[in-house]
Amino acid sequence: MQKLSLNQSLQQRLSPQQIQFIKLLQIPTAELDQRIEEELEVNPALEEGMDLDDRTKDEYDDDYDDNDEYGDFDEFDSYNDRIDVSQYLNSDDYAGYKMASDGWNGDDDRDVLPVIAQSTLAESLVQQLGYIKLDERQRAIGMQLIGSVEEDGYIRRPLRSICNDLAFTQNIYTTEEEVETILRKVQTFEPAGVAARDLRECLLLQLDRKDDDDISVTSAIKILDDYFDEFTKKHYEKIQRRLDVDDETIKQAIRVITRLNPKPGSMESGDSAAAYLTPDFLVTNHNGKLDVILNSKNAPELRISRSFAEMLDTYDKSDKNNNKHIKETVSFVKQKLDAAKWFIDAIKQRQQTLLKTMKAIVEYQYDFFLEGDESHLKPMILKDIANRIEMDISTVSRVANSKAVQTDFGIYPLKYFFSEGIATDTGEDASSREVKNILKELIENEPKNAPLSDDKLEKLLNKRGYNIARRTVAKYREQLNIPVARLRKQL
C-alpha cells in the first residue's frame, strides 16, 4: 500500500552569479582575454572601454565588501527605477532573467588551450601502412594491430586476443603466426620501436636500425638478448664477467642502451598543446619594500553599453497595451543588462580576490621575495592563507591553481610556495622544499658506483637536524623523480 510522506531537507546551491565568479577566479590570465571575448560576443549590453560618464561610474563602480567571498550582486536597480518592468512581465509566460543561468556544468572547467595541428601516432602508422604492398586481408590485420597500439607506442594486447577481435568484428579468421608476420612489418614503421610488446623488444627494435659493425651496438644487443634481467637490476659487474669485455666496452654498451627511447609513441602522440606561462602577478622590490601588482590583463576595461541601456527608455515611451513583442523585448534587454553587470562585478571581485591572496602570500614568504633564497621559504598550506584573508580554502586553492608570479628572481607558480613543514632539532619547522633540495644535493654528490640508500639518506638528514623518517625520504625522492639506489648505480 502506497503511503504519502513529507520530508524536509536543506540544500545549498550556488547562484548563477557565484558560479560565474568561481569560473572566472580559477582561470589563468592567459585565458581571461578569451573568456571576455566570448562574453562580448554573446552579450550586446557589454562593451570594452572605460565609461567616462560620472553618473554611469557612480552607478556601476561600487565598492565591495572584502569579507564577502563572492561580492554583492544586486539587481540592476538603476534601470528598474526608470521603468516599471513588472507591468510587461507575466510570470506565467516568462521565467524572467533570474531563472536564466549561464549553463554551467562540471565539463566547462576543462582547460581549452591552443593546439598545434599535426597527425597523431595512429594516423602516421596508417599512412605508412599504405606504403607497403599488402592484400586486403593483410591490410585489415595491419589496421587491427595499429588500432591496438597504445599512446606510448606499445601493443600490450596478446596476439590471441587480436585474432579473436578480427574474427568477431570483421569475420577474418587468422592465426597468431599470421598476425605476428604483419606485426613485424608494422614494427619497421617510424618511430623506431613502435608496436613493441614489451620494453626489451622496443629497445631491440631500435638497436636493429643501428650499425652492426659497432662493437658497442653488438654488445648492447647481446645484453638485452641474454642478460636483460641483470641489466634492469644494474648488475653490470656480472654482465661484464659473462660477456668477458673490458670496462670501456661495457660502459659504451650501457650508454647506447640508456640513450634509446623507452616510449617511442610519446613524441608522436603526446600532448601538443602550446602552453605559455603568463605571470598573473608582479612582485618588485623597491629598497626593501615589496610591491604586488596585478597583471594589467587581469583588469580589463568593461562597461555597460549606453545605447543598449537607453533601449529601455525607448520602450518606456512606446505602446504598452499588452504588446507581446514589447514584453519579449523588455525581458531580453533586462536579462542582458543584468548579465553584463554581473560579469563586470565578477571581474572586479576576481581582481580583488587575486590581489588579496597574493599579498597574503608575499607577507607570509616575505624573506624569500626579498632575496630569492629557497632556504627562506616557510612551511605554508592553503589553510594558512585562507585564515589570513578570511576566505574559504577552496577560494585560495582556485587562486593558487594555474597562476604564476613574476619576481626579480624568475617566474614561479603559486603552488611553489605551498609546502608542508618538517620539524628540526631547534624546534622550528623547515619547509619540505628545503629538505627536498638538500636531499637532491646529497644524491647528486653521492658515489656513483655506491649510491646512498634511503636509510643512509635518512641518517644524513637527521645529522643535519631534520627529524625525518625513512618513508618520508622515499616519498620526497619519488616526488623528485629520483630512482632507488640500485637503479642509480653507475660504472
Image (cartoon, rainbow, N blue to C red):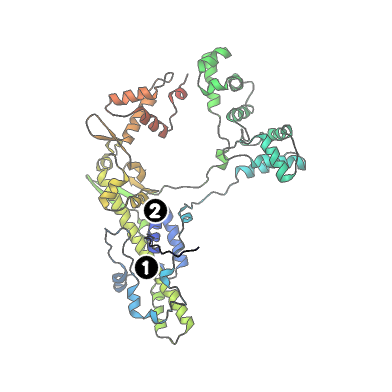
Residue 282, how many percent across, how many down? 32, 49
Residue 191, how many percent across, how many down? 61, 36
Q: Amino acid at mark 1?
A: Lys
Q: Which mark is residue 341?
A: 1
Between 388 and 166, the residue placed more toward the observer is 166
Q: Residues within 10 Å of mark 2 (few under 14, many from 20)?
A: many
Residue at 64 percent across and 45 percent down: it is: 123
Q: Secondary structure at mark 1?
A: helix
State left or right for residue 122 relative to residue 445: right
197 w.r.t. 244: above or below = below
Residue 485, how many percent across, how many down? 43, 23
Residue 70's quadrant in the figure?
Answer: bottom left
Give whichever of discs 1 and 2 has the lower sequence position.
Answer: 2
Q: Secondary structure at mark 2?
A: helix
Q: Amino acid at mark 2?
A: Gln
State left or right for residue 212 relative to residue 28: right
Q: Residue furthest front?
A: 1
State left or right for residue 208 relative to residue 290: right
Between 141 and 125, the residue placed more toward the observer is 141
Residue 42, how many percent across, how many down? 47, 66
Can the viewer see residue 129 in this picture?
no
Residue at 40 percent across and 79 percent down: it is: 312
For the residues marked 1 and 2, what is the alpha-carbon distance in whole angstroms? 20 Å
Residue 10's quadrant in the figure?
Answer: bottom left
Q: State the residue position of label 2.
A: 26
Q: Residues within 10 Å of mark 1 (few under 14, many from 20)?
A: many
Residue at 54 percent across and 17 percent down: it is: 250
